[in-house]
Image: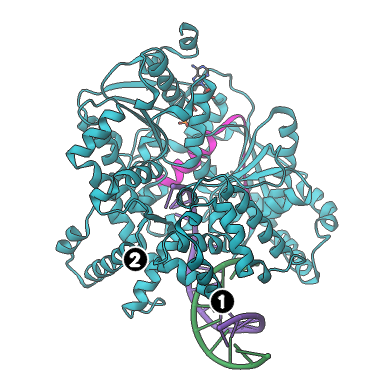
Chain colours: A cyan, B purple, C green
Amino acid sequence: MDDFLKGLNEEQREAVTYGKGPLLILAGAGSGKTRVLTYRTTYLIKKMGIGPEKVALLTFTNKAAEEMRQRVKNLGGEAGSLGFAGTFHTFCAKLLREYGQNVAVMPNYVIFDSDDSEAVMKKVLKEMGIDPKESKPGMFLAVISRMKNDLVSVTEAETKASDYFRRLVVKIWKAYQDKLKKNNAVDFDDLVVKAVELLKINRIREEINEKLEWILVDEYQDTNRAQFEITRLLAGKKQNITAVGDAAQAIYSFRGADYRNLVLFKTEYPKAAMVNLPMNYRSTQNILDTAYGVISHNTTHPTLHLETVEGSGEMVNFFEAGDERDEAKYIVEQGRKTAEEDGAVAILYRTNAQSRAFEDELMRRDIPYKLVGGLRFYNRAEIKDLVAYLRVLNNPKEEISRIRIEKLGKRRAEVFDKWLEQKTDDEKQENPGRLLEEIINVVGFLERFDERDEDDAARIENINELLAVASDYKSVEKFLESAALSESEIKQHKSNAKITLMTVHAAKGLEFENVFVVGLEEGLFPHSRSMLSGEKEEIEEERRLIYVAMTRAKRRLTLSWARNRLVFGGRHSSIPSRFLSEVPERLLKKVGGVQEVERKMSKPLAEIDEFGEKKRIIVQDWEIAEATKDDFAEIDNW
DNA sequence: TTCTAGGCGGTTTTT
DNA sequence: CCGCCTAGAA
Ligand SMILES: Nc1ncnc2c1ncn2[C@@H]1O[C@H](COP(=O)(O)OP(=O)(O)OP(=O)(O)O)[C@@H](O)[C@H]1O
């Protein structure tokens, strides 16, 4: 055990071995916050003799949850035996499954994901005779979601609805909720909202508080009001709650998260012990100074100048690409080289759409890679279609899935209904993979696809993947829950991939030897949407985002931007991100100067499978790149 | 009832 | 460029 504590510095040890009561750890990136949480979990169990089933570890994203479970396991713990280790949403879903009746949620309820919610909303608007072109479903969903996250009830919203728009929202909200109810469904936000309602019932909260006595929450700066409430209620009277967070890494305010919850924690628990972790164990000093150079421009929250236990390390690379393919080409090449030498490589971008150019290049060169996020596996049309059949099997009255099925063909739907009628309840409890296979055959699902078509072949592959995944679940119900909440790790280009592609959001909490932060252009990073309102807060969030991105790097960091980029199918030239100018110049090293030549030489190669028209466009790019050469002088000043 | 062309609008980020 | 939706043909 003493050996175990040797892996910690003084402050970390203090936090890990802290006894009962509330504990707040505020510390910068890479200072070992997550390490403290996992060590503390292990410490509680192994040293303090607390039953693992009494401990709940809460995170925000599936990725972070996975990372956490892994780390607990590496310390010799059984992540599986913990009371809970996963996301807020999963926690709430489980709670509702067991106790839901108390807040009018049936035990066999289904979870509607955002696609389903949108389908419901569209239906509501249609039935109310609102033109979807005038008022978009997404807009109403966003407004309602925001209120739910803030724990505003419909009733409350109604009494406060002073103008026409707000009254309309309330009306739509009610209709939307009715539909969910009719379908025995709960949407993402309601999972948390209903769980709060549930935990407010004394009898139930006390029962849960008995079961889960130790609550540990990662990334507290990203909790929203509803989630804050969950943690508060879970902490109960004992208040054995540990929270870690860093205001400089708050990047989820778009979904109602508020880093001021860190302050609220102190208000809620005035006696909370506070620990700060001063040393960074992840990155080189140059990387930290680069990140600090940027984040120090934020004024609405404290920013820490981190110090590493490592040396200063290499300079930070700065690459200027002609266009997004240049960017991909250079970065993939550099990534490939270092992946061979020293391991994990991440290419981080602001928006999912940016993965395209990198995937094309990696694919072309047949380099294994891993893509995180993007279109969720379970959101793909062919997968949703099949899942819809299972949902109808699970609950024949569920209209959203029914509509989906009918869109696949009236005849198919009828065949399916007949098949379903003959099924006994027992048969419906069969293995979901088996059931799916049967459905596919009965309705002739694959007839729509032509395996010679490339896209269709990929769809068939997805379907096979689904069958494999589904077979692992005992019941349809269990499978459906996981389908709604989890991010299935589907097959990648090749499995031994050392290069990972993902958004900065998805990379939070992770670390890599070599990190590329790409697309650093005004309008992309910071994103134009955050510049629109002119709100300082929004730009500051973008700045925190790039701060998170940079601090993922252990040894090497490269920042890049492209002078010209394909947006919406059209070419646009850009100027470098303001964040680049915030990096102290002495830390940057310009790289890839030979790129222009390289590009010319490799051009014919790059276009092997393209057709005439595309070639023309490329020639045009080239011309544009030539034309913007004058910008060089200006850009060189960066 | 089913299939397809083309008009239209839209992009942040996640559960 | 891409996916969604609708109108109109098969
Ligand atoms: N005392 C220590 N000795 C050795 N390595 C450490 C120590 N503390 C932390 N580390 C290592 O430093 C890295 C960063 O730690 P960790 O991920 O826990 O930081 P964090 O504060 O959660 O970071 P972030 O907020 O950026 O997610 C990890 O690789 C971790 O193993």
- Name the residue at 30% across, 51% down: A149
**Which label's residue is closer to the chain start, 1 or 2?**
2
Q: Is residue A518 left or right of residue A212?
A: right
- Report the quarter where the C terminus of chain A lies: top right
- Name the residue at 24% across, 30% down: A266
Q: Is residue A176 left or right of residue A525?
A: left
Q: Is residue A479 above or below residue A219?
A: below
Which region shows up in magenta? A540-564
| Residue labelled with disc 1 | A409
Q: Is residue C9 above or below residue A152?
A: below
Q: Is residue A130 above or below residue A389?
A: below
> Residue A283: which disc?
none
Q: Is residue A354 left or right of residue A97?
A: right
Q: Where is residue A457 shown, x and y percent of the image?
A: 72, 61
Amino acid type of the residue that numbered disc 1 sits on in the rendered structure: Gly
- Label 1 and label 2: CA atoms lie apart by 30 Å
Residue A45 drawn in magenta: no
Q: Where is residue A576 shown, x and y percent of the image?
A: 57, 50
Amino acid type of the residue that numbered disc 2 sits on in the rendered structure: Phe
Q: Within 10 Å of the Cα at label 2, are there few (<14), some (14-19), or many (20+) other Cα atoms?
A: some
- Label 1 SS: loop
* Front position in the image: A36 or A533: A36
Q: Disc 1 sits on a residue from what chain? A: A
Q: Disc 2 sits on a residue from what chain? A: A
Labels 1, 2: front one: 1
Q: Where is residue A330 shown, x and y percent of the image?
A: 73, 45
Q: Where is residue A375 shown, x and y percent of the image?
A: 56, 55
